[in-house]
Image: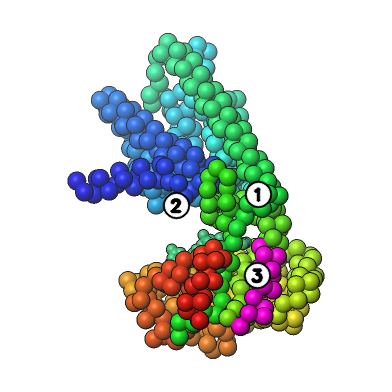
Amino acid sequence: MTVLSAFFKQVIKLWHSPDLALIGQRRERRMRMLASLVLLLVGSFWGIFFSLRGEWGIVMMDLLMILCGLSVFILTLRNRVRLANLLLFGVIILVIVGTTLLMDPHTAAAPRATHLYLLPIAVAALMAFRDERLWLRYGVALLCLGLFIVLASSSWSPTSAYHLPDEVRVSGSWVQSVAAMLMLFALLHILQSDAAERSLLDRDLHAALREQQFVLHYQAQLHSSGKVTGAEVLIRWQHPQRGLVPPAEFIGHAEKTGLIIPIGQWVLEQAFTQLRVWKDDPLYCDISLAVNISQKQFRQASFVTDMLALIETYGIDARRLELELTETLIVHDIDDLMCKMAVLVERGVRFSLDDFGTGFSSLSHLKRLPLNTLKIDRSFVSDLLTDANSQAIVRTVIALAQSMGMTVIAEGVETQAQQQFLLSNGCMQFQGYLFSKPLPLQAFTAFVERQNG
Ligand code: C2E
Ligand code: MG
Ligand code: MG
């Protein structure tokens, strides 16, 4: 009973999931849940229908549908989006082609209609694989269209295993045609409103930049002695209607559209302004600020010259600035990356590698780059006390950083037990809710006064 209620709670949570406010994602998840339910229901209905008539070959196909429906539902609950989509589309295409060939042959009296479902499925594939590589996105859609053309232009059927009488199939083909066309229109409508919402988000983000709706929060980074040595600046969007919007809901979109460049520039300017304010204050002059730099921003040809110009204009000590790069950034075009980093390091800027361990950077990359700090990702820290693998990874990262002469900082430290484990393995720098959440400037300075004063 408790398992069932936990299951339904999870379903309801995911259905509404407020944290997934990224445009289109929640809607897509709902559609996948509904599609898996349709597979379950249709499979069960026809399974019973054909098992009563002893058509066991068709019953096997229905069983496949039921199993697939269940798997897609579970994968959706576990957030395995790509696998769920691949399974869903694979089975749906297989079922449509199988049904068309085996049960819906083209005759003079009754034309084929089941293959019409391939049209809405092609549109649905464009939506579902939107964030995948082009070959996958367009490959699935083109496969559907190709199969549609083949089935529409041939009346071939491998067997006469189970053909409904023509008079049933005539009205059936009308129903199938209307249903397929309705699905097509519904999906086109969703695609269109999706695009409209995206451009709305675009427009809102432009307005946010213009009207200064972004704010920075500061999350303290502490030494094992309890002293605040720096802070990571984290952007939030003070939306006039939605309230404080976390970065997960707009940074990804801003990266896709290129808006991350002016947003990132704004963040840097704010950080520089703050460093200048603190420059002559004995309590804050040693505090450094870590700024997240997105791939597009760093790849800009003018990134280095812009940074140097900012350092000159604001007259700050560049050693107070740490740029956080991610592993995805450092695996591409390492030569360009090294050149840019070298110029900035020469000027005093420091670099850290964010979310270390979650990407695919190789040790040879690490060795070649002038990195100052490795940031152990929060996911390893949160599992530290329960997962032996996470413990091994964390120990290895600490040892690696030490052997390469880098500092190591653990992100997402939430409990004293986690801090203790990290300390006993040689990690001396921490960031996490145990010490402080990301705070607005005033609250952060009050925190520094308490800790360092
Ligand atoms: P990140 O750079 O890995 O930032 C750390 C995230 O972990 C922050 O989430 C922070 O609030 C959260 N965090 C820190 N300590 C704890 C903890 O103890 N427990 C838990 N559960 N969470 C903790 P936030 O602020 O939502 O930022 C998410 C991501 O958005 C950042 O991940 C970063 O990749 C991106 N981001 C934030 N600000 C900027 C920015 O100005 N520019 C760019 N390009 N990306 C940004
Ligand atoms: Mg970061
Ligand atoms: Mg991080």
Return the mark for residue 166. Answer: none
Task: Confirm or deny contact between disc 1 and disc 3 (CB under 8 A).
Answer: no
- At a point 67% along the width and 73% down the height, the residue shown is 277
Using the rendered view, name the quadrant where residue 147 is placed.
top right
Mark 1 residue crowding within 10 angstroms, few (<14) / some (14–19) / many (20+): some
Q: Which residue is mark 3?
A: 274
In the figure, is residue 81 to the left or right of 12? Answer: right
Q: Secondary structure at mark 3?
A: helix
The count of marks equals 3
Mark found first going from the N terminus, 1 or 3: 1
| Marks 1, 2: nearer the viewer | 1
Mark 3 residue crowding within 10 angstroms, few (<14) / some (14–19) / many (20+): some
Q: Which residue is mark 2?
A: 80
Q: Secondary structure at mark 2?
A: loop
Mark found first going from the N terminus, 2 or 3: 2
Query: Which residue type carries mark 3?
Result: Gln
- At a point 35% along the width and 35% down the height, the residue shown is 40
Using the rendered view, name the quadrant where residue 14 is placed.
top left
Up-down relation of residue 142 to residue 348 (above or below): above
Mark 2 residue crowding within 10 angstroms, few (<14) / some (14–19) / many (20+): few
Which SS does the magenta portion mostly show?
helix
| Distance from mark 3 CB to nearest ligand 1 atom below 8 Å | no
Up-down relation of residue 158 to residue 5 (above or below): above
Query: Which residue type carries mark 1?
Result: Ala
Q: CA distance from mark 1 to mark 3?
A: 21 Å
Using the rendered view, name the quadrant where residue 261 is placed.
bottom right
State the extent of the magenta-drawn residues as a range.
Answer: 267-282
**Residue 281 magenta:** yes
Of 180 and 52, the residue lying toward us: 180
Q: CA distance from mark 2 to mark 3?
A: 41 Å
Q: CA distance from mark 1 to mark 2?
A: 33 Å
Return the mark for residue 208. Answer: 1
